[in-house]
Amino acid sequence: MSKKYCRGPIVLKDKVSSVPTIAYIGLGSNLGEKKDNCRKAIALLAKSGRVVRASSLYRTEPVGLAEQDDFVNAVVEIETILPPEALLDQCRSIENELGRVRTVRWGPRTIDVDILLYGAVMIETPELTIPHPLLHNRRFVLVPLCEIAPHVMHPKLQRTASDLLLELRDHHSVVRCDENGTAP
């Protein structure tokens, strides 16, 4: 029996439906045990729903603030019944549990856990923007996203992840880690 996915949560009389939504979560770490931080975040995402698949880990150049260590990044596909705001709370909880301290924008962090896509939902509030507003400009997001979901559609731009990657002008290095987590 195949499962059906909604484009977002179905709200009936202020209750969220049990129909799951597919969401894509971006992970990044450049402090401490980077690979382990990402793996722990993937395990903790199971509290938010079923982890369907996770990309490989990638060593990536920092973007925004260049004078810092390289990152390890990944993307995770989850199936969740949580509404977007509750999923954001779970992402922040994971960041807190893994020691994230927000000091400098785009600065070093033990872990960053971002909602990239939530079905075909588009949200723009002071606390949450879905799709992630920089998703289509970031090689470190699009490469792992394309590994696990090349045909997923960006709901605002109406372009697939693979199309966005082909059109990308960002040339920062993104290199898949081997089994030991080191880049070739």
Image (spheres, rainbow, N blue to C red):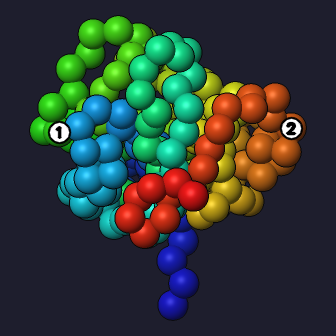
Residue 41, visible in the rendered structure: no
- The numbered mark, 1 or 2, whose residue comes first in the sequence reads 1
x, y (%) of residue 15? 29, 47
Could you tell whether 106 is left or right of 45 in the image? right
Closer to the camera in the image, 138 or 114: 138
Position above or below: 162 against 32: below
Mark 1 neighbour density, 10 Å: few (under 14) some (14–19) many (20 or more): some
* Number of numbered labels in the structure image: 2
- Residue drawn at (67%, 56%) of the image: 146
Closer to the camera in the image, 154 or 18: 154
Q: Quadrant of residue 140?
A: top right
- SS for callout 1: loop
Could you give the CA–CA distance between mark 1 and mark 2, rounded to whole angstroms? Answer: 34 Å
Q: Amino acid at mark 2?
A: Glu
x, y (%) of residue 20? 42, 62
- SS for callout 2: helix
Residue 179, visible in the rendered structure: yes
- Residue drawn at (44%, 36%) of the image: 71
Residue that mark 1 sits on? 98
Q: Quadrant of the C terminus?
A: bottom right
Q: Quadrant of residue 97?
A: top left
Q: Quadrant of residue 112?
A: top left
Residue that mark 2 sits on? 167
x, y (%) of residue 139? 66, 38
Position above or below: 89 against 59: above
Residue at the extreme top of the image, as rendered: 104
x, y (%) of residue 56? 50, 61
